[in-house]
Image (tube, grey):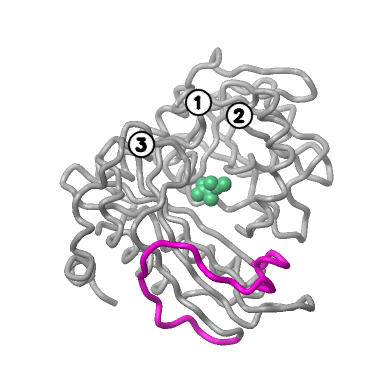
Amino acid sequence: AASPSRLDAVLSETYSETTELADIDWDSLGFSFLPTDYMYTMKCARGGEFSKGELQRFGNIEMNPSAGVLNYGQGLFEGLKAYRKEDGNILLFRPEENAVRMRSGAERMCMPSPTVEQFVEAVKATVLANRRWVPPPGKGSLYIRPLLMGSGAVLGLAPAPEYTFLIYVSPVGNYFKEGVAPIHLVVEHELHRATPGGTGGVKTIGNYAAVLKAQSAAKAKGYSDVLYLDCVNKRYLEEVSSCNIFVVKDNVIFTPAIKGTILPGITRKSIIDVARSQGFQVEERHVAVDELLDADEVFCTGTAVVVSPVGSITYMGKRVSYRDGGVGVVSQQLYSVLTRLQMGLIEDKMDWTVEL
Ligand code: COI
């Protein structure tokens, strides 16, 4: 594999126009799509291996109307971020974790997937080719969206005969419209996100379409997002539409255990390690919805949402507020350590960042 400096040299020769910062208003980034310069694609036949990946100008892709992803939802996605350091270099956060998660999701969805090395090299190449879109320090990050999809034509239900791995990127700021202010969640007690034995534990595209109805209804009522319960007991917390959930009580932090219906978030896993390194006791276990009633603090984690404090949760019409609707001290501490690590502002003792 090319070392970062060799990759960088190759890319700056090939994509020399891409080094100057893009001319956009870096202060107004939210979480909406902004087209950039290049995307990466790589194809593979069913039963084969991915090869000959390449960067190409960003643009629409052609697809057979009978493609497996369009007809039967045979698709996965990932999300990771690149931050620009003060010295201009770019940091990725645990990209191999996304590669490993895509591989396990692909196994569940009957798809071939890139090797960890192919995935990470493709991410590096895409970020470097689009480096002028990585926001200046403190202004946000470059969100990296790898996709894996059954792009070959099928009519009867079966795995597609061809697969496409694609990466595009977009500069982003805060995910929620609240910015860094606490969000307001509502617990959904009728619709469910996942079932035991289903695909809730992998990042398949259908999981996200399935939450749109509850999410839209919640937003129409002024909530920021929806917190889902398990579908068997209708009692235990699962996750929020786009992120994992953590609860704090008496300085002990707990979060729903991974058991096939919850997405194994990379930020979730990192926050557990960060919290333990800061001296907190962290428990991964069943968390009953009643425990929200007397919690001290609640926060969400995810690549897109980072660490988002929760100001209130409404369950069956009853609203509970945390830290008087302000940012909790534990959430603030964990957010600060994680983001300073991701931005290269503190020493990376965990060896999580990859510098480009
Ligand atoms: C992420 O946090 O990267 C995700 O993939 C969640 C998505 C709904 C924005």
- Residue 279 figure quarter: top left
Residue 39 locus on image (x, y percent): 40, 64
The quadrant of the rendering that contains the N terminus is bottom left
What's the magenta region? 47-74
Q: CA distance from mark 1 to mark 3?
A: 21 Å
Residue 339 locus on image (x, y percent): 36, 39
Beta carbon at label 1 within 8 Å of ligand 1: no
Q: Nearer the viewer, mark 2 or mark 3?
A: 2
Give the structural element (helix, strand or loop) at label 3.
Answer: helix
**Residue in the picture at 26% in, 47% down:** 22
Give the structural element (helix, strand or loop) at label 2.
Answer: loop
Give the camera-side residue of 237 and 284.
Answer: 237
Name the residue type under label 1: Glu
| Residues under numbered marks 1 and 2 in contact, where contact means CB atoms less than 8 Å apart | yes
Does residue 21 belong to the magenta stretch? no
Name the residue type under label 3: Val
Give the mark nearer the N terminus: 1 vs 3: 1
Give the mark nearer the N terminus: 1 vs 2: 1
Name the residue type under label 2: Ser
Q: Nearer the viewer, mark 1 or mark 3?
A: 1
Q: Residue furthest bottom?
A: 48
Give the camera-side residue of 263 and 125.
Answer: 125
Residue of label 3: 337
Give the structural element (helix, strand or loop) at label 1.
Answer: loop
Residue of label 1: 178
Give the mark nearer the N terminus: 2 vs 3: 2
Residue 342 locus on image (x, y percent): 33, 45
Which numbered circle lies on residue 224?
Answer: 2
